[in-house]
Image (cartoon, rainbow, N blue to C red):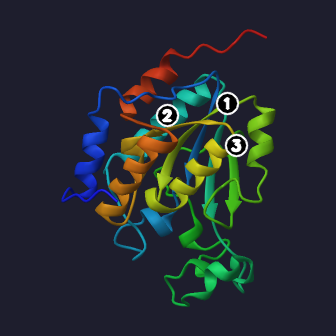
Amino acid sequence: MEMSSLTARQLYEHAKANPTRRRFGFGKKPMLINIDLQLAYTGLGEFATAYETDPKQLDYVNQLADLARAKGLPITWTYVAYMQSGEDCGVWGTRTDTPDSLQNIKVGSRRAEFDPRLKIDHDRDIVINKRMASPFHETNLQSLMVWHGCDTVVLTGGSTSGCVRACVVDAISRGYRVIVPEECVADKHESPHFANLYDISVKYGDVIPVAEAIAWYDAYQPEAR
């Protein structure tokens, strides 16, 4: 193991500054997947489990979603919530049992609600209630990627070290390109956030400035049918 005194943030910044780092790049058609932007994780001052990295995160997510809709590209929003008993959380819900515990995000509860700042088209956007970290786990997301002809995942949400990373690994394992706009993902603590941005950028996907993702969507031209 290589020893280093660098912080996780410094390791990530070094990787980001590497001019020889090759990107996977966008493919022909992306799906924008927004992970768990619900009040349990965005409701600062209301829920102890909430966090914020970039204060404009939700503004950027809305901007990407608006562009995707304008271009006829698919958008998925996920949230995590469980039945009243919490039985559908499985072993994941056995570590703690407090009001802030994962299995106590109940279907229909305020903790399960999407942040009201988000612009979600409930007639057109895809909404998935997931039970595990990755939105690909035992949901229909894979079949929707196939149906929409998508070869790329553009990923926002949280947490970077948890559900975002799980989605990144599952997506590339299924043969999809992965794009993570840096300002659009967040975590509870700095070190896991930057450690996972480092891992994603050097192993699994492209971590890019949100301005680049916005520019790509803006320039996208749907293929003629």
Report helix, strand or loop for mark 1: loop
Q: Where's the C terminus, which quadrant? A: top right
Marks 3,1: beta carbons within 8 A: no
Q: Position of residue 153 (x, y in %)?
A: 60, 38
- Mark 3 surroundings within 10 Å by alpha-carbon count, few (fewer than 14), some (14 through 19), many (20 or more): few
Give the foreground label among 2 and 1.
1
- Measure the alpha-carbon separation of dots 3 and 2: 24 Å
Question: Can residue 59 be seen from the camera position used here?
Answer: no
Which residue is at the front of the view, 143 or 200?
200
Which type of secondary structure does the marked residue at label 2 adopt?
Answer: helix
189 and 112: which is toward the camera: 189
If you read the primary sequence from the N terminus, does the residue marked by circle 3 or circle 2 appear first?
A: 2
- Residue 144 vs residue 19, the one in the foreground: 19
As measured in the structure, the alpha-carbon distance from the residue carrying label 3 to the one carrying label 1 is 10 Å
Q: Residue at x 37, y 30 (%)?
A: 21
Say if 7 sits above or below 211 in the image: below
Instruction: Give coordinates of residue 170: x percent, y percent.
Output: 64, 50
Left or right: residue 191 versus residue 174 is: left
Q: Which residue position holds label 3? A: 174
- Residue 151, disc: 1
